[in-house]
Amino acid sequence: MESRSGHLSWLPHLILVLGLALVGFPIYVTFVGSTMTTPEILSGHMSLIPGGHFVENYLDALTQGMPQLSGVPVSRLMLNSLIMALSIALGKMLISFLSAYAIVFFRFPGRMACFWMIFLTLMLPVEVRIVPTFQVTANLGLIDTYGGLAIPLIASATATLLFRQFFLTIPDELIEAARLDGAGPLRFMWDVLLPLSRTNLAALFVILFVYGWNQYLWPLLVTNTASMTTLVVGIKSMLTVDANTPWHLVMAMAILAMVPPAAVVLLMQRWFVKGLVDAEK
Amino acid sequence: MATVTLSAVTKSYAGNAVIHGIDCAIEDGEFVVIVGPSGCGKSTLLRMVAGLEAITGGTIAIGDRVVNQVEPKDRDIAMVFQNYALYPHMTVFQNMAYGLKIRGLTKDAIRARVDKAAEILQLGALLERTPRQLSGGQRQRVAMGRAIVREPQVFLFDEPLSNLDAKLRVQMRVEIKRLQQRLGTTSIYVTHDQTEAMTLADRLIVLNGGVAEQIGRPIELYERPASLFVAGFIGSPAMNFLDGTAGEGGQVTLAGGTLLPVTAPAGASVTVGIRPEHLVPAAESEAAAHLHVEMVELLGADTIVYGTLGTDGPALMLRLNGIVQIAAGTALPLGFPPAQLHLFDKTTGKRL
């Protein structure tokens, strides 16, 4: 970062700190809430200092069956979310990598038609096609399965386009050099294209994992039994209309729902930024 | 080692012919340079030999085998690309070893070949680096190393020095020539740089608009260019061209009235070529014409004089050895040595 010496150097910091406080405060309150009991939270003058029920609340949430969730513990929902998010992220990466590879490097009839069909699906977000997608999923018997949770969300125009753009920057000479070296199409993909794409793959994984983890509408529709639902959907189910909402557990679940995506972002931060900033030449 | 034989090779893209039938028999161990301006089809021709472009007509044979339908990897060739085309994620060693690994050589054999190539090219200390950690010249050497380890029958070079700075280019040019002499491998080298072409080639193919204007040894091309194009392309600074006509007796007269000591078929319109280094200052009494000096470049080793023939005649360039002080505006008396004059048919451009 270039340093701008001068009397205004505190201003950017102030703005950053204010922004951080704005975003961070609700999360902090949630965390504080997750360490208290529900009466403490609802008392009207909730303390901003964490209470003494941290271990107890989280253990409860993770291991105890929730009556609001038909007796399923939160750990099960987390597992569901994890499986769904990973399947979506990895599945999307696989499919879009392969389809971009086909579109960029091979000449076949209908190549551009395929490209435009993929491109057009960009204009159809999940919500628009949700009814027919549900119909298909139901007919395939995928309701209340991991397949049903993940497969309909795997096709991805965005990731395909991202890979396409990256593949187009690969110089023809590199492909020709590989041909002269005797590398066939699959070998070239495996030995050259895949290693060159690793920063893109990492960046994409972060984005897609968060996308998959945060899905709400689709898991809500496609799962009927509480043991197959995801954490994000589960939080909503905990909020009952009567006064029995266990707010301390809801807060704990919210924090638990935030941890995995945050961890993925933090762990892969270096790769993620690299993938977005410099497309390796 | 092998010969490479091109027979009536043509190339068209969607009906547009870009190579119009090239014939050339390249001998075993020969260094042939294909030279021409950009867009003349020289790279296309090389890529056809490599198998990266399909051959529209004619045949290309490496050794006794016609390779029109043979995959690039099976042609027993190695190619060095202009932008080196190194695999960015592999180390220098891996870059050189990759082709061998695919061919299924044992680890020891690969190691031995790469070490040998690295020694020849002085890459030993760089084997574990990746291409981005190398300078342009080093990358160039790795690209050549990748070609050497394959121990091919033919080396193909596609403008390998174009991305280097001038000094490095001269240095690498010498290295390539030395390497080729040492290995004795048949080589085809494409360039647009006539100096590179002249210095490297055993034989030159001058390509213009998809036609081989002349094929021959560099000095042949310099001394007896077959056409105006070759005359203008080979040699630096470029040859001077003057329009003239042959009179009744065949004596050639320049447009400005200067009589030249050469003859051509009577009545012919000709273009007279003379290289800047062959024009000589003459004594005033023997001068055939005068050069009106406009500008002088002192290069140390020689002096380039720019001017016009007569006061407002065609532009003329003169190259003198060493440092010669001449003021702009001087009228320099010139002689035209008959042996150094080249006569071309003005309409066809062919040598007379």
Image: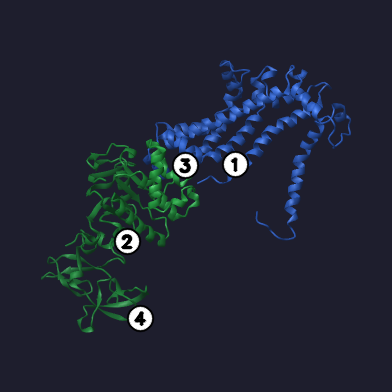
Amino acid type at circle 3 is Leu
Give x and y (percent) for residue A261.
67, 34
Near-viewer residue (A58 or B260): A58
Same-subunit check for callouts 1 and 3: yes
Q: Are marks 4 and 2 on the same chain?
A: yes
Q: On what subunit does the disc labeled 2 rest?
A: B
Of residues B157 and A223, the one drawn nearer to the viewer in this rendering:
B157
In the rendered view, does B46 fall on the left or right side of A82? left
**Marks 4, 3 in one chain:** no
Which residue is the site of mark 2?
Answer: B195
x then y, percent, for residue B6: 23, 45
Image quarter for residue B236? bottom left
* Chain coloured green in the rendered structure: B
Q: CA distance from mark 4 to mark 3?
A: 57 Å
Name the tint of chain A in the rendering. blue
Residue A162 is left or right of residue B20, and the answer is right
**Label 4, residues with CA under 10 Å away: few <14, some 14-19, many ≥20:** few
Discs 1 and 4 share one subunit: no
Q: Could you say which quadrant of the image residue A83 lies in?
A: top right
Farthest residue in the left direction? B249
Q: Are marks 4 and 3 in contact (CB under 8 Å)?
A: no
